Image: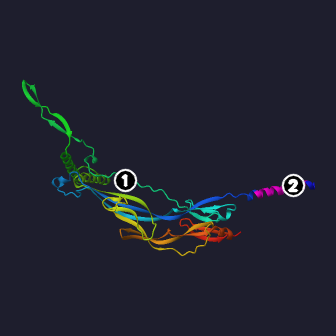
Amino acid sequence: MKRIVFILVCGILMTSGSFAQKKKEINTPVTVSYCLPKVSYKVKVKAEAVRHIPGPYAEFAEKELGMKPEVTALKEQWEIKSVEVTPFSVPDEKTVYSMTATGDYGSVMLSLSPEGFLAGIAAGSVTMKAQMEGMEYRAQEGGRQREIRMTDLRTYNPLKEILDTNYVEQEIDGVVKRIWDPIISYKPKTKRDLMAEAVREIFRIRSERVKLLAAENEVPDGKSLQVILKEFDRMEQDYLSLFMGKKVKQSFERVFVCTIEKENEAVVAFRFSSSEGFVDRKNVSATAYSLVAERVIVPAAAEMQAEPTQSVVYYRVPAVADVKLVRLTEELQCFRSVIPQLGMIKKFPTDVISGEGLQLEFYPQYGSIKSINKIVR
């Protein structure tokens, strides 16, 4: 019996030693890449365009209606209504780093944000709020109307009836008589025909309106009369636009992305023209709207010295600056903003983290240290 127990104990010891030996032999290197963020700015611009469209019969306005046209030439007038500047974090392609560990990985385990930003080291589960960019829908631009056409106002026959003189001879009561037998043909209406028809419609609408107001058409007072009068007003304005022209307003929204890389260096966000609206950034004839960072402040931060071959963690000491929206040289808006890429990049040796049992947390959107704590075992 003692012999059997001894054999079992020896077997357990040998198995345990075998497992321990296998565990010591795990030297597989594990490499994890991470990046530091930079801040870009979303510039959302709302603008309004007023399109002046002349009427095709403007030359007849004074003679036929006794009115002077309001719009005589096709043109556009653009105006910016609002500009909204919002910072957001993006990966900085210039600051991509890797960390390699073998054996005991626990002391240098990394926590990363969904974007790949460094969030913590040996920090366990780090609470972080992922940056979620929503989808923005903007309606497509409507067709840019350049003329007012009679055919857009109502359904009508574009052809006019022509009666050609034609006589036939026919005997009536023993007498041969010439009888008019017109030949009816059709041909397209001329510009003057269309103009005359529009004038008749304008005066017809005004006449019908007067009859309604005088209660000559037996239309009951109240809502029905109000609806009819409103429709007559709309019809009259449509026909008057053929002579007076019209102005059409349309709203537009554009979103631009701008990244500041240097202090006091203006970065063009977009260019805008009062006659053309949004144009290409290279079009120097249009007014430039730019972002510029001024009064940049970088907090002083001591850096831990590390050997050239020593493994380190890189982090940022972000800068804080006044971000200004300027039109040419005129300041339109200013706000204080954290700009990581204008700050400094520091190193933190990983052997200090593992040797001292430290726990580091970072601000993922800025790449800066949030807290350093000692792990309580």
Look at the picture and state if 85 lies above or below 166.
Answer: below
Q: Which mark is residue 141?
A: 1
* Residue 253, percent from left and from top: 39, 59
Scheme by which the image is coloured: rainbow
Q: Quadrant of residue 44?
A: bottom left
In front: label 2 or label 1 = 2
Provide the residue designation for mark 2: 8
Q: The magenta stretch spans which residues?
A: 4-21
Look at the picture and state if 350 lies above or below 276.
Answer: below
Q: Main secondary structure of the magenta part?
A: helix
Q: Dot 2, crowdedness within 10 Å: few (<14), some or many (≥20)?
A: few
Mark 2 → mark 1, Cα distance in angstroms = 84 Å
Q: Residue furthest top?
A: 174
* Residue 115, percent from left and from top: 55, 60
In the picture, which quadrant includes the N terminus?
Answer: bottom right
In the structure shown, which secondary structural element does the residue marked by tag 2 occupy? helix
Kind of residue indicated by mark 2: Leu
* Residue 182, percent from left and from top: 14, 33
